[in-house]
Structures are given as C-alpha cells and as structure tokens.
Image (tube, helix red, strand yellow):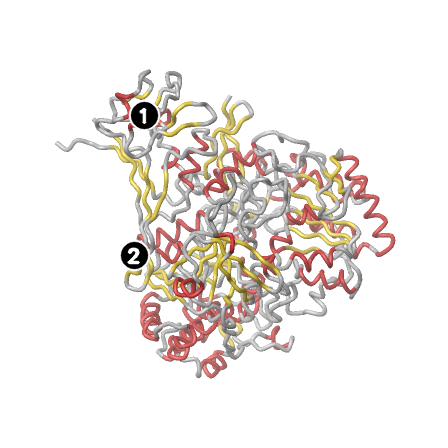
Amino acid sequence: MKKTVWSMCGMCSVRCPIRVEVEDGEITWIEGNPHILKRALCAKGAAGVALVKDDERPQQPLLRVGGRGAGRWDAVSWNTALEYITEKLTGIIQKHGARSVMLSCRGGPFMDLFKTFIHGLGSPNFTNHDSGCGRNVHHASKSVYGLGRKDFVYDIKNARHLVLFGRNLFEAFRIAEANQVLDMLDAGGRMTYVDVRQSTTGLKATRFFMVRPGTDYALALGMIHAIIKKEYYDKAFIEKYVNDFDALVSFIEPYTPEWAAKECGIKPKGIHDFAEEVAMDRPRVIFHPGWMLARYRDSFYSSRALHILNVLMGNIEVKGGQIFAKGPGDYGQKGLRSLDAQVPKPSERRADGVGWKYKHFDKGPGLFHLFYNAMLTGEPYPIKALFCYRHDPFNNFPDPQAQKEALDKCDLLVSIDTHYSEFGWYSDVILPESCYLERESMVATQKGPSPRFIVRQRAVTPRFDTKPCWEIFKLLGDRMGIGKYFPYNSIEELWRWQLEPTGHNIEEFNEKGFISLADKPILFDRDNLEGRFKTPSGKIEIISQVLTDAGLPSLKPYESPHAPPKGQFRLVFGRSAVNAHGHTINNPLLFELLPENTLWINKREAGKLGIQEGDWVEVFANGATGTIRAHVTEFIHPEAVYTIHGFGRQVPLQTRAYHAGMSDQKLQRGLLQEMDPAGGGLCLCENFVTVHKSSRNLVRRVEL
Amino acid sequence: MRKYTIFLDSKRCIGCHACEIHCKTKNRLPVGPFLCEISHKPLVSVKGVPKTMFHFRSCYHCEEPFCVPVCPTGAMQKREDGIVFVDQVKCIGCMACVGACPWGIPQYNPETGKVVKCDYCLDRVDQGLKPACVTKCTTHALKFVEFKEIQ
C-alpha cells in the first residue's frame, strides 16, 4: 500500500517541507511540498533515502569504556544508558548545583523541548551553535532595529536589486529563497555579489566585486558614502524613523568610494555605477546582512553597515524589501502552547556571562564558546556536564584540541544525535536519535509574511534501537524528577497539548502538510511603524544605546586587515550545494558527488609555489597540518585560499568520510576565544596558513 | 518519431546536482552509475563577472540508436514515442550496448549485474508524470519538453 507522509526535511537546518511516499514500509519517493516548493528538492534532501539505509550511524546507545576519544564503546540498552546519565548527573548536581549543567543544540524551531529540560533541571545554561555562525548578524540587527535577524524576511522575488556580501545563497541555499532569486533575475532584476572568490551565486550576478579578504566593511562604508553624498537615500523614511542620522553623515566623510576601492582592490567606477543603480532600484533593493558571519574582527560592523544600507534604501515593509516576519498574533490567532513557559525561569546568572557581564548580547542562547572559559577556570562557577543535541561543537567551533582541553574538566559529556559527530566520538554517552524520516517532531511556528504551523511526521519505523528526541528528553526528565514538565506519553498527546489553545488539530496537517495561519499576506502600514522597532528609543538607531552603554562604538572607524605575511594565505571556507557542513559527508550518495574538498589557490600564487591543478599540498597553521588537493584558479583573491567546510572527519566508523579531505577548523588553532567584542561572533577567517607542495606528488615506484 | 526531450534552462541552473540524486534514488541505483549528469566548462570573465554555463546530459534517445541493434537479447528497445529503454528482465549484462554507444550512456549496475540507462522514467511518463530529475529540480530549471508537429 502506498501512502503519503507530510513531513519536514532534516538533512540540513533549513527544514524544507517535504512529501514522502512510502510503500510497504519503504520510502520510494521524497519531493518538496508541492504547495510550497512545487516539488523541488535539493541533492541533500533526495539523499535522505540513503541516510535511512546507512548502517554507519549509531544503532543503539553507547557507553564509553576507554579514554575519551579512544573509540571503545559498550553497546547498551536505553535503560542502562539513561541510568548511567541519571546517576552521574545527580552526583554532579549534588556537588556543584544544577547550574553546572549546560545544554547546546544547533538552534531551530524545536528548541522549546531542550530549553524545558535544562531549565527544568534549574540551570540557565542553554546555548547553541550561533557564536560560530550568525551571532554577529543577529546582534547587528538588534543594535539597529532592536529586532533579531529572523524578525525580517526578504521579499527577494519582488526586489529589483539584491546585494550579497559573500552570502552564497546558491550553494548554502534554501530552496524557496534560491527560487525567489532566480525569479527576480528572470524578471530583469539585478544582483551584486561581493566575495574573495567566485562562487555559484556570483555566476548569476550582474555585478561582481572580488575584494581583498577582510575588507567587506570598507566596501559597505564606501557604498554608504556614495549613497549619502548623492542623496540617493529615502529622506522621508529616515526623517520619520531614524535617530542620529547626522552622526552617520559626519562619520562617513573620510570613507569615499575612491578610498574604499583602493582598500578593497577594485575600481572606484564600480562603486559609483553601483550607487547609480540602487538609486534607480530603490526602495526595492535588499542588502543581505549576511548569514554565517563569524569571520573577521569587524564582521559585526560590516553587517551593521549592511543593515544601515537597507535603512538608507527605506526598504522596510515594502514590496521587494524587508518585511516584518508575522506570527499567529498578527493575524488574530493564538500561538502554540510552550513547554518551557511552564518551567520557572532559573534565577542563576549564566556561566557564559551573557546578560550580566555582557549586557549587549542576546540572552536567549548566549555564546557557547564562553562556556569553555567557565570549564577551564571555574569562573563564575564550574561547568561539569554538557549535553549536545544535534550539535557538533568540534565541527562548528575552531580548534577542537583546545575544546577538548576544556571538556576534560567536565564529568559528563552526552551526545544526542542521528550520526556520529566528532564531539560524540569524544563524549561519554551517545544517545542515538532516530533520523528525521524515522521520527516525529513537535509542532512549530514558521513566521513570515504568511505564518504557518509546521510539523514533522514519521515516514518509516526506525531501523535501529533509536528514539525521537521528544521521547529521549521525556525519559531523561522522568528520571531526573522533572517529568511534570513533559506532560505527555506519546507524540499525539504532545501535539494535542501544544495545539489546544490554537483551536487547530493535528489532522489538519494531512491536507497540505502545514496549517496556514493567513489567507493573504499583509503588510503593516509603513506610515505607522511606531512601536515596531524594539530599540531603547523605539527608533532605528544609528547610534545604538545598548552599544554605547556597553562602552562600544556604534560606528567603528575602519581598520585595515593585516595582509598575510610573505608565503602565507588567509584560510577562508564555505559551503557546497551537496553537503550540510560535516554531518552529511558520510552519506553514500552525497559522498559519491563530492568525496573530498580541495584547496582553491590563486593561479599566480600557485605558480610561484610550483603547484599545479590537482597536486597534493600541505597546509600548516600554528602547529596543525592538513593535506588536500589543490584547485588552481584565477578566480580567487591572491591573499586567500578557500576550502569547503566539514571534511577531514576523524570518526573511524564513518568509513567514507574518515580522513577524506581537509578540516578547516582543525587548522584554526588559537581562535577559540577570538571573539568580536561587539557582535559575540568568533573570527574564524583571522587565520593565516602556509601552503607547500606535498612530497606525496612523487610518482616513482619501486615495488612490484 | 522522437516525442520528448529534456531541456535545461541554464540561466536558472545553479549546478546543485540534485537531478543526479533524484535520478539515482528513483531508479534505486547504487554507487557507480549516473544516468544523468550536470557539468560545466571552466570559468571565463564576461564584463567583469566570471561566468560559466551548466550543461545537462542524459541519454540522447537517438533516432537510430547504436545500442538497440547490438543487443543480443532484445532487451534494449526503442518505443514508438522514441524512448530508448532496457527491459531489465531480458538484459543479461553482456555490455554490448555499452561498447556500441559513442557517448557511454548505458552503464553497468553492479548491484543487479545488468545495464541501466535513462528512459525518461517511462513508468512516470506513462502515468502522465514527468521524469524524476525534472519533477524535483531544485530551481525548476529542467523542463520535460514534448515535441509537436507544426501544421
């Protein structure tokens, strides 16, 4: 019997809605939800079938028996594993208090469950991956609008001009967004792309700036200068909604397009022509403020400048601009009931210092890397237990070796994941989660111009002794004496409990896979946006009150990035369209497409080093080394070398991914605490490496 | 008379290779054979923007295919609508077709010991659907085109 299951992809964190066909317990077809994605699905999403069939994932709970990372495991029952965790955790809480326990996840729409567990235990220490990703963008957005980066959606389809500073949205892509961009281009829209190399996104650009690595902020300042001097900005909007515009006008004075062009290594005419274009296209111009901007020391200020450029365009709440993400409340509907809201808020201060030591950072997830300091120093108090749910800090943050030194101060490390993460391999217990096609998830809200409730439904029964996270946390909660915060015995009961105040029921998902909360998208009245901006002043702030209070500049004078010392390069990294960081590398179908990454190196620089296309090269950085094949191209800046992130994995049970390609984060030695003080993001591209042609290229053979 | 072809709108293609995996999963292919393929030429700078075009290749479904007459069992066949396909029951995996095709289109499936090739997902076409690669193309860049005679 063939049946349709409406679900949600789990191959990457975009979580595209999918329709799955199942015949006799086997998945025969996965496609994008026809109502939303018109069946489109990417390579990763299609390879979900191979994930289910893959045996190279944890098949039952595992308890470490050797040293950490030695890879000796006891396969145990769920009961034994949960008992072990309960006993250890109880001991830790008795000795060090509940605050010594922390939990991290990747983030996303299902955080309610994980927050409930950690807050239920009495610890404030919930965190996620974002200090190695988008925190700078988020905090920059907060400092300008008082709203997070996800409080706006971009109406790209109706835009006339999309400006991307390294936002490689055709390789690190969201299907719906990629289609919007192509629709915009098909309709004659323009796209300006800025990067240190050419990417697939840049191929479609109408204007391309290859800039010197680390000079994004300079180019953004030059653009602001050109737009302000020629008065190409939306005066009425700025008059009405923006504070301290004069401060911007005087600050920008020295940052002429000519200066910016020189700093970035491009032609000034390009910036002037660009300004003319956006003057014509305004207000339907979107400056994407960046996605993964844990890169340079001034990435927060680059992102802030891009947010300011959007303000100059006056593109807020207009067709083809930035639109306020609407929730159920904006359409007169009730939201989902939250588990975490039932838990008393822990009164303890966070161990990462966010909220009291660092008042300008968003308290929600705090900053993961700062917990490593608490582990090492015991200040402000010790952290002794770490749960990582669907999060691999070794693949996310720099310098896994430095992370291990901090983790060695912990008495309990638990990895809850569908696959062997590098962190999991180092942990004490692996609790295997059923993969996304084998499990359900809670109902979640997807904000946007037309908000929806979304849910993941189980397509097939788990192949191994794995469990879904809603059950894992309930079992842990019950054992830890906080079962009352998990008021359900089955997923159906949990869905019902969540949906009860909304008046909707789970059966409604069977029609289209989602519950639409709006018949038609609405725009707020653009002339009456008062109260929408959540800054202290209620206005868009050029000078952020929050930053000033923290003793930080809102408009930071530009500092030129260091050029790499002679013979060295700046190591930059990015995504490919066929992998989602490290966790899909071992997928048999995706591995066949991209079995290893390469090191992009500028043709002229490669020539000096005697490196040819396909040669093995050795990459050195502060005592760490990697070996990788070279890709020689003229389309990367001479100061940079580039590689795809996520490779060079060292989990022996992942036979395909094991030591395939080179890991960038293992070369990021000493960068674990290199934090942008204003944005909280790590500076992962502040890394110089030496590249040599490898001795492995010799081809003489003396054996038979 | 050939009735169908697959067209790639290169302007929309982002080289994500999803079509290759849609094909492999629909046809339950193991590691090894690819029945369709996305490729591109090296980049060249066009008015300051480094550019390239993506190309899609599956079987050409020739008017007079080389692979059909060399098949000793009659497994390789051409339908009235021009679709060239392998009857998996009749195929003995002798690889004669593999040698005959100038473009290396038929490929060996190590799991079944037989030959596989693009047949435009003819089971889907017969149900009025489109091939898997076209149906699920990430950016709707692939089109399944039906030729019509112009009067």
**Residue A85 higher or lower than B93, as above or below:** below
Q: Which residue is mark 1?
A: B97
Mark 1: amino acid? Cys
Q: Nearer the viewer, residue B29 or A234?
A: B29
Question: At numbered mark 1, what does the secondary structure look like: helix, strand or loop?
Answer: helix
**Residue A79 figure quarter:** top right
Callout in the foreground (2, 1): 1
Mark 2: amino acid? Gly
Residue A195 in view (yes/no): no
Residue A1 placement, left or right of B15: right
Distance from Cα at disc 2 to Cα at disc 1: 46 Å
Residue visible at 58% across and 30% down? A460
Circle 1 chain: B
**Residue A3 higher or lower than B6, as above or below:** above
Residue A214 in view (yes/no): yes
Q: Which residue is mark 2?
A: A188
Q: Residue A337 location in percent, x, y?
A: 65, 46
